[in-house]
Image (cartoon, helix red, strand yellow):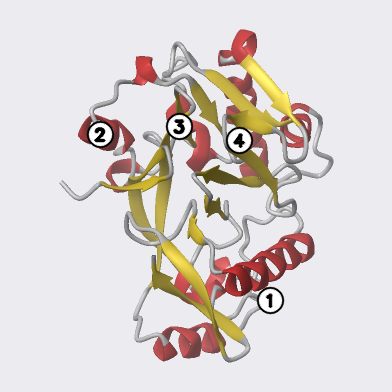
Amino acid sequence: MGNTTTLTLGEAQISVLTDGASTFGPEMFPGTEAAHIDDVLKAGRETEIRTNFNANLIRTGGKVVLVDAGAGSLFGPACGHLPEALAERGVTPQQIDILYATHLHPDHVAGAVTKDGKAVFANAELVVQEADADFWRNEIPGAPQMLLDWQALARTVLRAYGDRLRLIEGESEIAPGLHALPLPGHTPGHAGYRLSSGGQQLVHVGDIVHAPHVQIPDPEIAIVFDIDPDTARAARKRLLDQLAGDGALITGGHLLAPAFYRVERNGRGYRLAKG
């Protein structure tokens, strides 16, 4: 099938689940000349700005955790394949104990609710950073219509899991061995995670990177979806530098293919190597 790949980390098990894939145009990277993006792509022997939409399935400490829920039907047939990926791992929506949303953007939570606003994961506790929930719950002055549409969906998701909503702050525990990794900027409460088990570690980089063959070679490049591009850029540069130094295994919301990687230094930027 090819929608998943699985890793054993100590006593934990992690699967990368692919909800779908797409491409971006250079206009999605404001402040960066299209010619520069083309140069970066050519250096990596790429012809398109590719992205994936990923979720993670984690078994740790007796809990079944789903990290993000995909785009659902929002983007047409290119996405919405999370149910197939879960089935490939032999898991039903009812078996998910915890749904951890790295943030409340549509491509991460639209798959968490039905078209009529009901919870897809009927037994799951929704865990999200309080800063992200607060941002989407409150008025956003001067917001364009797209952001207002995203806000409406975020509010629908928060309502759907309202009696099973757990708001966290900072590096709070999500499940045994699994802790949030705050990476603000993309959204105010955007976060990844750190999973530790058996003396080993996996880092989820969230959405610090949307186009791996563009933003990893040149982490200065911001994407239009960042609420605060400067803060998001700083988070990206800081984490990539740290990961290149410690060699930790990583996954992320938009890294290509169901796979695990390590970050390596490459000139003034970085590159990914298969983990």
Q: Which mark is residue 66?
A: 3
Question: Callout 2: 10 Å neighbours few (<14), some, many (20+)?
Answer: some
Q: Which mark is residue 149?
A: 4
Image depth: mark 4 or mark 3 in front = 3
Q: State the CA–CA distance, disc 2 to disc 1.
A: 41 Å
Question: Callout 3: 10 Å neighbours few (<14), some, many (20+)?
Answer: many
Q: Position of residue 10 (x, y in %)?
A: 43, 44
Q: Position of residue 125 (x, y in %)?
A: 55, 18
Q: The residue under label 1 is which amino acid type?
A: Gly
Q: Residue furthest left?
A: 1
Q: State the CA–CA distance, disc 3 to disc 2.
A: 12 Å
Q: Which mark is residue 89?
A: 2
Determine which quarter of the picture holds residue 232.
Answer: bottom right
Image depth: mark 2 or mark 1 in front = 2
Q: The residue under label 4 is which amino acid type?
A: Asp
Sequence-first tag of 2 and 1: 1
> Please, is residue 86 above or below residue 184 in the view?
above
Q: State the CA–CA distance, disc 4 to disc 1.
A: 24 Å
Sequence-first tag of 3 and 2: 3
Residue, disc 1: 31
Which residue corresponds to the image point at 45% horizontal and 34% vertical from the top-left? Answer: 69
Which secondary structure lies at badge 1? loop
Q: State the CA–CA distance, disc 4 to disc 3.
A: 24 Å
